[in-house]
Image: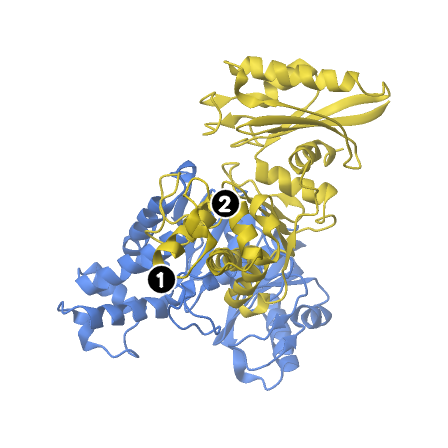
Chain colours: A yellow, B blue
Amino acid sequence: MKKIVAGVDIGGTNTVIGIVTQQGECIGEVSFPTQEDNDFTSFVARVASQIKKLLSTLNTEYSLVGVGVGAPNGSYRTGEIIDAANLRWKGTLPLASELSKLLNVPVKLTNDANAAAIGEMQFGDAKGMQNFVVITLGTGLGSGIVVDGRLVLGATGFAGEFGHSSVKPWGRQCGCGKQGCLETYVSAPGLRRTAFKLLADSIEPSTLRGYSYESLTAKKIAGFAQQGDSIALEAFEYTGAMLGMKLADLVTILSPEAIFLFGGLSGAGSVIFEPTKRHMEKNLFPIFRNTVKLLPSGLKDKNAAVLGAAALIWQDL
Amino acid sequence: MKKIVAGVDIGGTNTVIGIVTQQGECIGEVSFPTQEDNDFTSFVARVASQIKKLLSTLNTEYSLVGVGVGAPNGSYRTGEIIDAANLRWKGTLPLASELSKLLNVPVKLTNDANAAAIGEMQFGDAKGMQNFVVITLGTGLGSGIVVDGRLVLGATGFAGEFGHSSVKPWGRQCGCGKQGCLETYVSAPGLRRTAFKLLADSIEPSTLRGYSYESLTAKKIAGFAQQGDSIALEAFEYTGAMLGMKLADLVTILSPEAIFLFGGLSGAGSVIFEPTKRHMEKNLFPIFRNTVKLLPSGLKDKNAAVLGAAALIWQDL
C-alpha cells in the first residue's frame, strides 16, 4: 500500500481537508463550515469521519500515515489550539491528541503561516533553501521562519509573530491591544485603512471616493491601482514602504536567502512587490543589499493551506 | 596530555590571547597592540608565536587542540575577516586558514557578538538554554542569536546585525551610511548623543553641562545618573525605551527564553536594565509578556571575549 497524508486547514469560516501525496498532489478534497458543532469534541469527530470518508472513495492501495493541521493559534509543540479569537470554542483545545486517538495515526498541528513555510519548503519554491521567511498577507500578517532548514518556534513555541512587531509607536490601533503593529498597515484591512487616510489627506479625484469603508475591499483597491487610480497606487506605495522597512529589519536579524509573500494581498503583483522590494533595499544594512530574493509563493493558491498542513507530516517521512 | 584551547580577541586597539580550559578557566594570558605589523601575515605570525610562547610557560601536560578567534567582521562560514573598518589591513583576510597552517590545529573565527553568545552558552548563564540572544553594548550594538542551540548565521553568514535595524526613519546618521539605526541610539556614543540632545532641548540644570562632547563618556553619564542627575537619568530612560521597543520586535520574531546585555553600557546596572525591561514588556505582543528574562551576562567582564572565542572550539569537542 502506498503511504498517504491528510492535510487539514481550519479557518474561521471553513475547514478544508485534502488527501495529499508525497509529491504534493491533492487527490481528494472536502470542505465544510467550521463552526457548526456546539462542542469541540464533535468537531474533531467530524474531521476524523470526513477523512475516513475521503479515504474510502480512493483506490484501496493507500494507507493513511499521518494528519497535518494548520489552525489559528495552533502550537506545534503541544498540539493544542490556544485561545483562537476566530473559533467559537474557547481556551485550550487538545486537537492533535483527540484526532490522533480517533484515527490511530500521528497528528501534527501548527499555525497557518508556519504551515505555509513548511509547504513552501516541501512542495513550493523554497525546495533546498536553508534560510527563508514566508509572509502571509490576509486579514492579518503572519510569518513562518526557517533557519538552517528548521522552523523557528522559540522558547514559547509561538515565534514568528512578525505582524505584531511595531512599525509606528502610538500608531494605528491593533486587535491585539497594542498600537502601531505592522499588520495594522500591511494586510487587507491595513491597505483599506491607508486608502481611507489618503482620501482624507488629499483632494485628488479617485474612484475610491464612491465606496464606503465596509464595501471597499483590498481586491477592489488592487484593481483600481492596476487601472492607474493615483490614490490606490499611493496606498500600495505606502503599504510597500512599511513592509519593506520592516523586512529590512528582519534581514539584518536573520539574513534569509529569500522572502516569500503569500496569500490575498500578494496576488496584487507588482503594485505590492515593486515598492516593497525598493524600500527593503533602501533600508538594508549595506552588506545585505541584493542578497535577498523577494518572491511570490510557489504553491498554487487553491490548496496551499492544505498542502502546507500535509507537509508537516511528509517532511518527517 | 590534557586538551587545551587558545582564545583570541582581536580588537581595534589590542589583541588578547588566553589559554582556556574546558571548564572556562583562563590559565595564561597575553596582550599586545593589534596594529603594529605592517602586513597581515606578520600579524598572524605574531599571534601564532605568542600562543606557542604562552603554551611553553605552562605545564607540559597540555596539548593545543584548536584556536577560537573573535574579530570585527569575522565570518564563521569562511574563516575570513571581511572589510573591518577598525583594522589597518583592508579587504578579505584569510585569518583562519593562515593561523591554522602555522599551528597545525583547527582555527574557528566569528565576530565579537557571536563569540559572546557561544561563550555565554558554554561558560556563562545561558548554559542549557536553547533559544537566547546576547546584545553587546559598546561603541556599537552587536547581537549573537541562538535558535535551538545553534548560532543563527543566515544565508550570508552575517545574520545578527540587530544594531543596524531601524529605530527611526530619517533619524540619526549612522557610520554604516544609513539613518536611524538602533546603535545610533543604543551604544556608548548613542547615549552621549541622547544626552546632548536633552541638554539642548531642556533648561534643566545638570552636571553634564560642564562637559564637551569629546570629554563626556558613557561611563561618566552612568555615574551622574546613579547620583540622581535628571538629564543623565532621562538619557538612560530614552536609551532603554529605544532598546526595549526593538527587543519587543525581536521577541515577536524569535521568542527567546532570555536576552543578555553584555559589555560597556550594561555595566550601568538598573539605570539601563529597568527602563529597557519596562519598555520591552509594554511593547510586547500579549502572549510573550513575562516570558523573556532580561539578564546581565554571566561571564566575568575581564576575559569574556577570550572565553567566548575559546568556546567556539570547546563547543565542538
Q: CA distance from mark 1 to mark 2?
A: 42 Å
Q: Amino acid at mark 1?
A: Leu
Q: Is residue A117 above or below residue B35?
A: above
Judged by depth in the image, the label closer to the viewer, 1 or 2, is 2
Q: Residue at x 68, y 65 (%)?
A: B78
- Placement of the N terminus of chain B among the 4 image quadrants: bottom right
Q: Which residue is mark 1?
A: B265
- Quarter occupied by residue B148: top right
Q: Is residue B165 above or below residue B251?
A: below
| Chain of the residue where label 1 is placed in the rendered structure | B
Mark linked to residue B302: none
Q: Position of residue B143 (x, y in %)?
A: 49, 58
Q: Residue at x 64, y 15 (%)?
A: A101
Quick check: can you spot residue A5?
A: yes
Q: Residue at x 56, y 35 (%)?
A: A111
Quick check: can you spot residue B27?
A: no
Looking at the image, which is closer to me, B225 or A310? A310
Q: Which residue is mark 2?
A: A188
| Chain of the residue where label 2 is placed in the rendered structure | A
Q: Position of residue A53 (x, y in %)?
A: 73, 16
Left or right: B242 in relation to B109: left
